[in-house]
Amino acid sequence: MRPRASAFIATSLDGFIARPDGSIDWLDDAQALIPEGEDCGYLEFMASIDVIVMGRHTFEKVLTFDPWPYGTTAVYVMSRTPVPIPVALAKAVHNHPGSVASLVALLGQQGFQHLYVDGGLTIQGFLRAGLLDEITITVVPVLLGAGRPLFGPLPNDLELTLMRSRAYEFGFVQSTYRIDATD
């Protein structure tokens, strides 16, 4: 059985997930607006997943976080070239050089049921492959003007259904969409 795949990501109002150089300093600044004790649904989402899939750039960025934010949760890094994995993470982090479809099939065979897909290029790959089921986007009220976009080219239109939306008093707007099957 194919595992469900969901993305949970923040963007600037103009649709960027990072600056052109990959910096997310704008997101760090925005987090200062969030009241203590509020996580915008992140912990609930993380409790629902059993494996994380990300691209190489996202992995390299997450490696700079102290401490490693995913504990012992399995992480698969999509990269055509080998990814250096720190010894301390060797049991949890794996490199996958193949396609999105081959990774999803592998994770299904291994019994995983809910994937957290992270990183712009990886999310775009899952969308193009028709393998992303749901996306939660938290829009932060900042315009970057340039950067790494969340979305990219698609082979056809994708229909989405709004499942829920919430406006936070500190300016964030979070919407969750189901990605509907296309013909």
Image (spheres, rainbow, N blue to C red):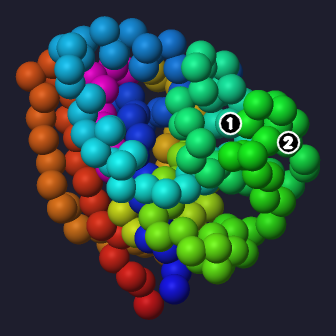
Q: Which mark is residue 125?
A: none
67 shown above or below 157: above
Cβ–Cβ below 8 Å for labels 2 and 1?
yes
Residue toward you, 94 or 81: 94
* Label located before the other in sequence (2 or 1): 1
Position of residue 154 measured from the top left corner of the image (x, y, whole percent): 55, 66
Q: CA distance from mark 2 to mark 1?
A: 9 Å
Image quarter of residue 20: top right
Report the amino acid beneath label 1. Answer: Phe
Residue assigned mark 2? 83
Q: What is the x, y in percent for residue 24?
A: 53, 20
- 146 lies above or below 133: above
Nearer-the-camera pick, 97 or 49: 49
Write down the region rendered in magenta.
135-143
- Element type where label 2 sits in the image: loop
- Magenta region, main secondary structure: strand
Q: Can you identify the residue that label 1 sits on?
A: 59
Secondary structure of residue under mark 1: helix
- Is there any visible trace of residue 124 in the rendered image? no
Badge 2 local density, few (<14 within 10 Å), some, or many (20+)? some
Residue under the image location 58 percent in, 20 percent down: 67
